[in-house]
Image (tube, rainbow, N blue to C red):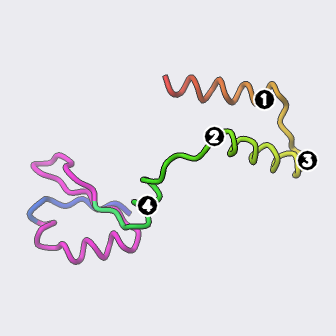
Amino acid sequence: MVHEVGSFEAKTRLAELLRLAERGDEVVVLRRGHRVAVILGAARYDELAKPPGDWRASLTKYCEERRASGRGLSREAIDALMREAKAERR
């Protein structure tokens, strides 16, 4: 769940907001109605901060799992997925 609080309120309720973040909630701190900070729990931060994995290894694993379940991907399907991903980055 996302909670929004003003900066003064964040200062006065910091202990409570830290407990919320530790539990998995996100706390957005606002100053004059604009987002200036987000308080996240350590687990969520670690998840977001970890470097991206090797996409080739992920794709290989995905294809192997599909093949093992009898729903293998053709070369054309893989190429189409790659084109989609490339188009989304633009």
Magenta segment? 9-38
Q: Residue at (9%, 49%) from the top-left corner?
A: 32
Q: Specify the label residue 70 is tagged with.
A: 3
Q: Does 2 sit left or right of 52 as displayed?
A: left
Q: Secondary structure at mark 2?
A: helix
Pointer 2 residue: 55
Precedes in sequence: disc 1 or disc 2: 2
Q: Amino acid at mark 3?
A: Gly
Residue, disc 1: 77
Name which of mark 3 and mark 2 comes first in the sequence. Answer: 2
- SS at mark 3 in the image: loop
Which of labels 3 and 2 is toward the front? 2
Image quadrant assignment for residue 8 = bottom left
Q: Earlier in the sequence, mark 4 or mark 3?
A: 4
Seen in the picture, residue 42 relative to 19 is either above or below; the reply is: above
Q: Earlier in the sequence, mark 4 or mark 2?
A: 4
Q: Earlier in the sequence, mark 1 or mark 4?
A: 4
The Cα atoms of the two marked residues, 4 and 2, are separated by 19 Å
Which amino acid, by three-letter code, is at mark 2?
Answer: Trp
- Mark 3 vs 1, N-terminal side: 3
Q: Is residue 74 magenta?
A: no
